[in-house]
Image (cartoon, rainbow, N blue to C red):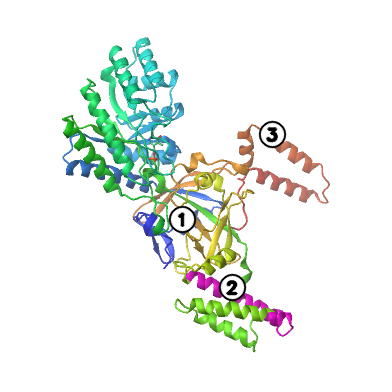
Amino acid sequence: MNNFGLDIWSNKNFVIEDGQIKLNYKSMPSLLQIVEDIRSDNVRGPILLRFPHLIKRQIKTLYSYFDKAIQNNDYKGSFNAVFPLKVNQFPFAIEAVTSEGAKFNYGLEAGSKAELILAMSKTPAGANITVNGFKDKEMITLGFIAAQSGHNITLIIEGLGELKTIVEVAQESSLKVPNIGIRIRLHSTGSGTWAKSGGMDAKFGLTSTEIIEAIALLRKASLLNSLSMIHFHIGSQMSDIAPLKKALREAGNIYAELRMMGATELNSINIGGGLAVEYDQHTHSKARNYSIDEFSSSVVFLLGEIMDAKNVKHPNIFTESGRFIVASHAVLITPVLELFTQDYQEKLLRFKSKNPPLIEELIELNELLNNTNCIEYLHDALDHMESLLTLFDLGYIDLQDRSNAEILVHNIIKKALYLKSSNPTDELEQLQVKLQERYLINASVFQSLPDYWGLNQHFPVMPLHHLNTIPLRAASLWDITCDSDGEIGFNPDKPLYLHDVNLDEEDYFLGFFNVGAYQETLGMNHNLFTHPNEYTIEIDENSYKIKNAVESKNILDILDSLGYDIDIVSNRLKNDLSCSDFITKKEKNDTLAKLELFLKQNGYLRTTN
Ligand SMILES: *Cc1c(COP(=O)(O)O)cnc(C)c1O
């Protein structure tokens, strides 16, 4: 049975039951049920669902694996984690992070002034704040203000200039000095699409010469005892663990050297983020070659080993994994608005009491096609089709026969494609591309899956229902932007099959999974489609609650955010309409009311789907 790779990407967060995908948690609601609940309130268009229990699960997982590794390795340092805000700054994601985080002393990481302000207002009391990224004097002063306000904050410097500014601020004020961290410029590089953060040519970090200089500078300013952390980040979505191990050796040795050089308060190594999430739906192309178990044991074991060899105190370990914490918590649900080639449905077959012999044969082929005979039957069908077309040209069969033949042959090809989908022949692959169905989805790839557009990042996608039925249509997905890049094409190497549904009779919904990391803030308002309606779903033993509704921006608000005067816009529209000729006053008023309503809705399509 096609389970859309659920066992690969879902980490047991979802299960298929009764033909639907359900949350594998407590009362186990189905996604379809939740979506129908929301839509019963006249909500249309794409919906983003947040599941806070999945964020909590990841936080617990992260801490428990590191705790286990620390015990197993008799490691003497502590484990600490912060959530990097750039991965998802939306309030109801952060609320889940900080409410669960408070139990673990889980802090926040900031990479800009705005994120630092957010971190200062949201970090659970006593938890850590780390600050990365380029900083000016104002941002550094903000770090001092955070320390003065009681935050456990570490400013991680990206260059010597920042360190000089820290010394300056410390000398100019009596504010509490924050902890200082040094980002090291790794000799080794990461792996994965985003591995631009490490290496000698990296954008960030201090070289060994600069580190030595930094120590001298701190010593001279009597701030060496504020140096508490060294940091590296080898890039997001590490596909392979080997580069991390190299980086750990490098960082571990730098740490040991600095301790021996007199940095006696240096007590932590921050290994950044990068812990990968599995997005793939096919076994042959999995995105990572390690588990959280291996990741945590490797980090703890290696650091212990390096320190023991140099007889240096075990450092506290910090991680800044973000993608791993929040990717799974958000699901984007998109209604399908249209299937573009629905003309070959079996129900459109209209047989005669006596069909031409070749049609009878096609009927039989269609019925008896199976895994062992399908290539042979497919060839027979293609052959018959050729003959039937010739017979039609010669006037021996009529248009109804021809239509029946086309539907039957299409169906035979579809079945053969599916039966051989794990091992298609060249011929089948060509047929597959020709016969794919285009599903129009009520969403914008640019807004909701920007990494697909920008980085070709695949996100797991599957229907929410019909999961008892084998999907037979090779599918490509089109979004509703009028941009040809807003398409998720059919990839014969990683095929997606969807169901043949009649949208006049029923809705068909697709879910895009693991969209909780990076997509929301990176999303762009191309064609002025904004963030979809979002909801937080809290599941308990008996049922679930739909909370924290945030509606998609309405059309006037979108124009307002671009800087248009929306009064001028709406008055112009209303005046133009009012001044036009209507036969009845009623129609005029009704039309004006309609216009008013349209301006107050979001820009997604509101057909019955
Ligand atoms: C982006 C970033 C992270 C988060 O990386 P993930 O791959 O999401 O875990 C952590 N630390 C720093 C410094 C970053 O720039």
Q: Residue at x 35, y 54 (%)?
A: 11
Query: Is 437 positioned to the left or the right of 584 in the image?
Result: left
Point out residue 232 in the picture as x, y percentages from the top left corner.
34, 33
What secondary structure prevails in the magenta region? helix
Classify mark 2: residues with Cα within 10 Å, few (<14), some (14-19) or many (20+): some
Residue 61, placed above or below residue 256: below
Point out residue 116 in the picture as x, y percentages from the top left corner.
41, 28
Quarter of the image for the C terminus: give it.
bottom right
Cβ–Cβ below 8 Å for labels 1 and 2?
no
Cβ–Cβ below 8 Å for labels 2 and 3?
no
The answer to which image quadrant residue 10 occupies is bottom left
Judging by the rendered image, the residue that carries numbered circle 1 is 34
Point out residue 582 in the picture as x, y percentages from the top left corner.
82, 49
Measure the alpha-carbon separation of dots 2 and 3: 54 Å
Does the magenta portion include 408?
yes
Q: Which stretch appears magenta?
A: 390-418
Say which mark, if any, is on residue 410. 2
Helix or strand or loop: what does disc 1 sit on? helix
Q: Nearer the viewer, residue 38 or 244?
A: 244
Q: Residue at x 54, y 46 (%)?
A: 453
Judging by the rendered image, the residue that carries numbered circle 3 is 567
Disc with the residue nearer the chain's start (1 vs 2): 1
Number of callouts: 3
